Amino acid sequence: MKKFINDVDNMLRESLSGLGAAHADILKVTFDPTFVTRARRADGKVALISGGGSGHEPLHAGYVGRGMLDAACPGQVFTSPTPDQMLAAAEAVDGGKGVLFIVKNYSGDTMNFQMATEMIDVDHATVLVNDDVAVENSTHTTGRRGVAGTLMVEKMIGAAAEAGAALLECKAVGDRVNAATASMGVAFTSCTVPAAGRTTFDAACASGRSPALRVSWRAPVRPPAPRRPRSPSPARQQQALMGEMGHPAPPQAHTRLRLGDRCPSQPG
């Protein structure tokens, strides 16, 4: 993946400054410590705060707004935010009904958010998201990670908070949504960490088919290495992934798509 980057060390600050400038009507970006909030604080509701390492956009800053988060704490690329960010964000968005932290299950995230909760002076609770079934029994992680399912948790809690739900009611919603959510990643290429300048792993396909059809399961943002299924057939991928996630595959769709097929609106 190629990117336009002026300075790797200043990339996060530049990108957040651009986000704030482009959406100044709905967002406010604060630095030292860094966090993103709604342009105007929403009083009289539970304040929702999430965060994590940058590089997973639009999570989390892209989901700050009505019906979603009140604040997001972005760390450096693939690096957890720090407790001072969370404390400053909580102070900025607390509307008198308590603060709910939505935390992805990574060791750095959980440790730093826990430190913040031990220092905060307002009513608070935490929802831990762990939807990623790919690494449930991995020795490289602290259990299932919080990945794509975090968006579902944030959206559902956001709707509940906006409707006036109390702090513990919002937590109950988040815990319930998390328990019902499972995900697994599939990727054709690895991500490229800007500071490294190269892909994290090679998603080579073991089937011997065209290099254009390389595919990797359990696409990690960090170790362990991904699994490489023998066939990148969409139908087989779907069946296998649904099995891995503990759910039966849905009935065959009416429209059958194959790798290389073009959407009707896609130019030839």
Image: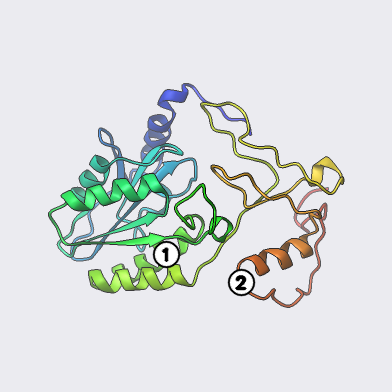
Q: Quadrant of residue 33?
A: top left
Q: Which residue is mark 1?
A: 153
Measuring from the top left, give residue 97's x and y in whole percent: 18, 65
Which residue extends farthest top?
Answer: 7
Residue shown at the point (36%, 47%) measured from the top left: 109
Kindly report which numbered mark, 1 or 2, lies closer to the viewer in this rendering: 2
Q: Which mark is residue 128?
A: none
Left or right position of 180 against 114: right
What's the distance in space between the residues labelled 1 and 2, CA to CA? Answer: 20 Å
Q: From this viewpoint, is residue 106 visible?
A: yes
Amino acid on which disc 1 is placed: Val
Of residues 24 and 50, the one nearer the viewer is: 50
| Residue marked by disc 2 | 246
Q: How is the image coloured?
A: rainbow
Q: Callout 1: 10 Å neighbours few (<14), some, many (20+)?
A: many
Examine the rendered structure and indicate whether residue 161 appears above or below residue 95. Answer: below
Tell me the quarter of the picture where residue 204 sits: top right
